[in-house]
Amino acid sequence: LLTQEQKDSILLELLDRDENFLSKIRENQFADVERTNFRKPVSGVVSNEFNPAKGHFGIDIVSSESTPVLATLDGTIVLATWSLNNGYVIQIQHSNNIISVYKHNSELLKKEGDKVVAGEPIAFVGSTGVQSTGPHLHFEIWQDGASVNPQKFINF
């Protein structure tokens, strides 16, 4: 049987280990995404920047209608659909729990389950969905369920 002092000592040691572990997680939270070589999904001008405080979890890139939208990394299409707000949307699952999202496309070139390589055309720029104000790509990067500013990793 352990004394209360021994129990407290063990508890403090476990808490210290947990805090060290959590600290390492916080330091490396986006390490995988920072070491990733993203391809630019489309050429154009960023018209609306990343601002999660205002519910804008990606960037808007103005480009000509029907410009090919390219996969930013190798991966698998996990969503290829239409939504009222975002029009034609495609989402790619990449390694390291990274997901890229492409919204307001005029047409999708891939379907769910398709494998893609970085730089491969997956859609065409459009202005679909009620939230669109003109031809552009709304582009998001997520890792482990957290939105990440694409401009930190890709020069537009």
Image (cartoon, rainbow, N blue to C red):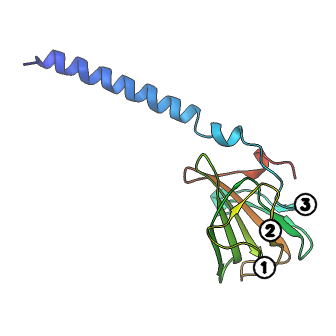
Q: CA distance from mark 3 to mark 2?
A: 10 Å
Q: How many marks?
A: 3
* Of 98 and 53, the residue lying toward us: 98
* Of 47 and 32, the residue lying toward us: 32
> Is residue 142 found left or right of 121 in the rendered image?
left
Indicate the amino acid at tag 1.
Answer: Glu
In this view, the mark in front (2 or 1):
1
Which numbered disc, 3 or 2, marks the residue that appears first in the sequence?
Answer: 3
Q: Which mark is residue 107?
A: 1
Dot 3 surroundings within 10 Å: few (below 14), some, or many (20 or more)?
some
Secondary structure beneath dot 2 equals strand
Dot 1 surroundings within 10 Å: few (below 14), some, or many (20 or more)?
many
Q: Position of residue 35 (x, y in %)?
A: 71, 37
Dot 2 surroundings within 10 Å: few (below 14), some, or many (20 or more)?
many
Secondary structure beneath dot 3 equals loop
Residue that badge 3 annotates: 43
* Of 92 and 114, the residue lying toward us: 114
Q: Position of residue 11 (x, y in %)?
A: 25, 24
| Residue 82 in the image: above or below residue 92 | below
Taking the spot 87% from the left edge, 53% from the top edge, the residue there is 156
In this view, the mark in front (3 or 1):
1
Callout 2 touching callout 1 (CB < 8 Å)? no
Taking the spot 62% from the left edge, 40% from the top edge, the residue there is 30
Q: CA distance from mark 3 to mark 1?
A: 17 Å
Which numbered disc, 3 or 1, marks the residue that appears first in the sequence?
Answer: 3
Quarter holding the N terminus? top left
> Is residue 76 found left or right of 145 in the rendered image?
right
| Residue 53 in the image: above or below residue 107 | above
Residue that badge 2 annotates: 137
